[in-house]
Every structure is written in structure tokens, then in C-alpha cells.
Amino acid sequence: MKSLTNINATSFNQAAVAAQQASDQGQSVAFSGGGTDLLQQVKDGTDAADVIINLRSVPDGRIIESNGAGVSIGGLVTLTELSEDPLVISGLAAIAQAAGSVGTPQIRNVGTLAGNVTQRPWCWYYRNGFNCFKAGGEECFSVNGENGQHAIFGGGPSYIVHPSDVAPALVAFDAVFQVTGPNGDREVSAEDFFLLPITNPVRENSLAESELLTGVRIPNVSANTVSTYHKVMDREAWTHAEIGVATVIQRDGNSVQDAKVILAGVAPIPWRVQAVEDFLIGKQISAAVAQEAGEIGIQDSQPLSNNAHKLPMTSAAIERAILSLAAG
Amino acid sequence: MRNKDKRDNRSDLDSNIDPVVKYADPTRGLDPQQQSRRDFLEGSGAAVVAGAGISALGISTAQAQSSNSAARTAISVTVNGIQHSLEVEDRWTLAELLRDELDLTGTKIGCNRSECGACTVIMDGQPIYSCSQLAVWANGANIQTVEGLAVNGELNPVQEAFVANNGPQCGFCTPGQLMTATALLNNNPSPTTDEVKDAMVGNLCRCSNYNSIVEAVVMAGEQGGVA
């Protein structure tokens, strides 16, 4: 691996200050949670890190706790911990299921919530060193190239799909993201955290240089809330979502009072299908309603030359996710 | 840094010198008791290519790239019950530390990008990819490698079950498979077939010997686990 310096952070703020200092000295800086994907990128040369700031040495960043306002989850909580936490499983099932669907046990044992949410895209052009938008270039090679796994929603000028399974579940639960920078802390809603490439073709979220995601806050959910994360992959396990559907529904019996439907694997950000949400409110969950919801879910899609297969898959995934939340 | 005595005393696939090499010229034959294939490559062949910055196997090694200016950090790790206090280059992976510095070459580097699982070790009770952790991050950690499974020459039950079920074919993925399986059985002494498959999805076998591997782990559980 290239030469680099590791800094063990003592606090999130100290990490941000150290990042800015190194950056001011002309060094390339990367924050590391679990580090798995980061080290791949450093080995491949798609991340030029001269300085890696290790966040796992930060105390108190790895706690899941419930208080009057909801549930707080530290950014350093591992995906294994998130998927096995009784509080998350019982009240925030979609988040536990999404975390448990990531990669492999070895990855989930070190991979963190914050790292999963902020990981770079897995577009094969970007990962193989093409000078695309994500690498600071001026072109998306997928447009006229191999785009079978690229965006059917929200694309342009880059057509990556956001790689996180956990992020759509967080958006579906109206999570608030906690961000720390050299000059202090800020909060941003999960939905506003992610940026379409039309806004910023280089980065997938609103983190400024030297800012990092430190944790999330999930507001209280009502007792009649049910949720699920339904993931479709192009093999049985150990890959990103071809389609993921995070669904959170408030229901009385089978009558839908409120709904959130957020998709993974189909857009450059966790993709909210509000038309499906609006359609579901007031409906009784049934096979017919779920099927129609799936059809509505792809109404605004804009497939590329090689990814139209995602359309029926998306419809089917939405349909199955909703049906799985029917009462009894 | 290298402890040749320790390695020569270890039963290792490396001592299985290719018979063609071993018997081609008996007067110059390599004695596996004295020199392993790895020793041979490191001692002669590798010296030729070290100048090009790669090892004989084409895998870039920490040593081959090291320079005086590289950042170094003192760490302490416990590996197979033995505590090591040593200085590592910040860029070394845990797999490189284990193999190149501690001479524990049972841990294999397959893909070197957290995809194949050959480098799996148990760190603080959980299986992890040692190729995708910096050694410096392991400071204070308790690590078990495949060399730590057998006790006083007695294979652990997972190893026994792998032998009984022909778990290894080419054998390259086996150390990683054994570590993931051992971690599973530590937490779940008698897993079902489905639980074994879920737990071991991050260990690929290029020989595709999955059925035998799963059967071996299930058998190890049925016979009392690793306790």
C-alpha cells in the first residue's frame, strides 16, 4: 500500500480539526470507520489518502440508546451490532434488516453505520480508475457504456446508484444526521443529507471538507408502526442491492395511515417514491393494492440502454415489501 | 525479525516441496526438513525480483516497499495468546503484520480486497478480514489465527471435521474457512445448515467445495463444537 500516516482520533471534533490541518498542508485525508472499503480504495488508487484518521479510537461513538425523543445511534456502531440490537429489531426493523443485509459477517463486524451511509459509489467505472465525475472528471462513462447497474431515477450528469442499504431505512424513519466539522456541530435531515448529482456531481452528500457523520437520531415512532427492508440481489448473498425497498407504515389493522417508501440501488441517492406513499394512505393492504403500488413506483423512471430490467424488479420488490407488512 | 527456527519446527504445507524439484537431481535435492519452498523463494528467487518491488509471487509486500521515511507506530497485540510489542509501519495491513513480521503464514492473502475471506482471523471474538485492517488499528486487540487452533498438536474439532469431510481441496481458502467456522461455533455450538451458510458467506472457495465445508462445520457442531 502507498505510504500513509494513521492518526487515532480522540474525539470527533479533534478528528475534524486534524483533517483540516492536514488538508491545509496539502495532504489528502480520509476518515475511517471500519476501514474495509477505504483500504480497498487506497490500494486501488481511487482514494489518494496520505492521512487516515481512525475514528474507532473515539470513545462514546458506539452507543445505541433510547431517550424521550427517540433512539440515538452512534456513527461507530457496527453493522453487526445494529442488526442484532433488540431495541432496533423491535422498533426499527427496517434498519436492523438493512444492516444485516450488507456484505458479509466479516465486513459487518467492522463496518460502521456512518461508513455504510457515506461510502463511495460502486460504479465499475469509478472503481476502476476512470476519470469520471466521481473522480473529479467531466464525464459519466456509463451513459454510453455499461450501465446495467446504474440509475433509473435521478440520474444526470452522473448515473451512479447510491450503495448504502442502511441509508434508505434511515430516510424512511425520518432520521436526523449529526455532523461534526472543525467549527462545530450541525444537524441535517437524512433526506436533505444526500445530494443528487445535478446539485453536486462529485460527492453524494452534503458533508463539507473535513466534516464527518458522527451519529443519527431517530424520532419516536408510533406504536402502530411496522417496517421492512426488502433487498433483491443479482446473486443470493454478498453484494449490493440491485433493488432495495425500505418501507415504514403506520397502520390500523390493514388500513394504512401513513407510509414511507425509499428505494436503494436505483438512484444516486436513497430514492423516495412519494407517489407510492400517497397512493397507499387510506388503502387496505391487499395483493391488488400492493401490485398497483409497485406499478406506480416506476412511473417516473428513466432507464438507460441496459438497465430496463430494473423496472419490473423494482415493481415486484415494492409489491413484496408492502405485502410483507400486512397485519396477521 | 524472522524466526526460522520456529518455522522449521512447524508442520506446514510449505514443506511439501514439489516432488519434481525434490527428486530431479538427488545430489542437489532440497531437504524439506531444512528448507521450505517459502524459504527457498525468499532466500534466492525473491532476491532477484526484490529490486523490482514485488515478491516472487507477485504480491507486493510491506518489506519490499518500505522506506526510512514511512510513518511507524508502536503497538501491542496478542496473537494466539502471545503478546507482541512491536513497531509497525502505518500502511501495513494486519495480514502483512501476521505473515511478514510474525511469520504466521497460515493466514492467506487471496484477493487482498475483503472479498474472498482467505485472510480471515478472529479479532476480539469476531471473524474479520485481516487484509482490510491496518495493523496499527489492531493495537490492544486479541487475535487468533489458524496457527492457534490446534492445541498441543491436537487439531480442533473444526479441523478434524474438515479432514473427515474433505473440506480442503486446494486448501488456500481453508485457514479462513476454519477461522470463520470456529468463531461461529464459539457463539453457536451446534448451528443448522442454514446458519452455517449465513455465517460463512464471506469465505469463498474457488474449488467450489461448499457442500463439504458446510457439512464439516455442521458435523463439528454435532460433535460438541469447539468448547
Image (cartoon, coloured by chain):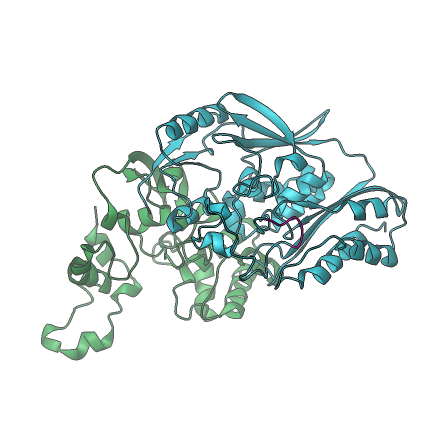
Chain colours: A cyan, B green
The foreground one among A18 and A61 is A18
Using the image, determine if residue B51 lies above or below residue B162: above
A153 drawn magenta: yes
The answer to whether residue B226 of the structure is visible from this angle is no
Residue positioned 43% across, 34% down in the render: A54
Q: Position of residue A287 (x, y in %)?
A: 86, 58
The foreground one among A235 and B11 is A235
Using the image, determine if residue B136 lies above or below residue B60: above
Prevailing secondary structure of the magenta residues:
loop
The foreground one among A219 and A61 is A219
Using the image, determine if residue B55 lies above or below residue B143: below
The answer to whether residue B165 of the structure is visible from this angle is yes
Horizontally, residue A200 falls left or right of residue A31, namely right
Q: Quadrant of residue A94?
A: top right
Q: Which residues are magenta?
A: A152-156
Residue positioned 86% across, 55% down in the render: A289
B63 drawn magenta: no
- The residue at the far left in this view is B27
User: Count the marks: how many?
Assistant: 0
Q: Position of residue A3 (x, y in %)?
A: 30, 41
- The residue at the far front in this view is A138
Q: Position of residue B128 (x, y in %)?
A: 46, 48
